[in-house]
Amino acid sequence: MRTIIAGVVVLLLTLASRADTAETLKDGVFAGESYGYKGLVRVAVTIKDGAIEKVEVTGQRESRPRSALTTIPSRIISKNSAQVDAVTGATITSDAIMSAVRNAIEQVKK
């Protein structure tokens, strides 16, 4: 029974990770925001040819580790998905960036 449940969980997580970019996206620059460790984290997401081309953190007050502010956007672009691995020691900031990108993507789905 545990094996079946574990298999279902893996399947659901796989489908969820693909859901944010499975639809065709409109080209343009779109804003998103989400709460991080010390307040709002704002992003600008550039979509070109239906794919995530650029993710820029445009506003934040996060303090640790600041590498998440560049690492997470790079991972999102590489994977073309807002569901990527968090930066160790900056899980809340990482999650806030991913959530802000998802919020921006919600605006651009056709």
Image (cartoon, rainbow, N blue to C red):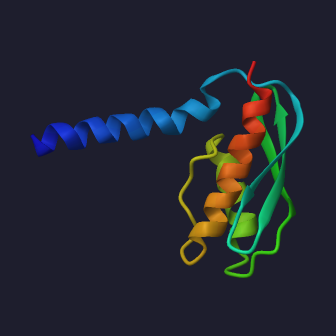
The C terminus lies in quadrant: top right
Where is residue 4 shown, x and y percent of the image? 16, 37
| Total number of numbered discs in the rendering | 0
- Foreground of the two, 14 or 71: 14
Q: Quadrant of residue 41?
A: bottom right
Where is residue 98 shown, x and y percent of the image? 66, 52
Left or right of 77: which side holds 3?
Answer: left
- Foreground of the two, 102 or 39: 39
Q: Quadrant of residue 81?
A: top right
Left or right of 95: which side holds 9?
Answer: left
Left or right of 104: which side holds 8?
Answer: left
In this view, 43 is above or below 63: above
Where is residue 97 shown, x and y percent of the image? 70, 57
The N terminus lies in quadrant: top left
- Foreground of the two, 65 or 34: 34
Name the residue located 57 percent from the left edge and 69 percent from the top edge. 91
Name the residue located 75 percent from the left edge and 65 percent from the top edge. 70
In this view, 88 is above or below 50: below
In this view, 73 is above or below 102: below
Q: Residue furthest left?
A: 1
Name the residue located 83 percent from the left edge and 68 percent from the top edge. 60
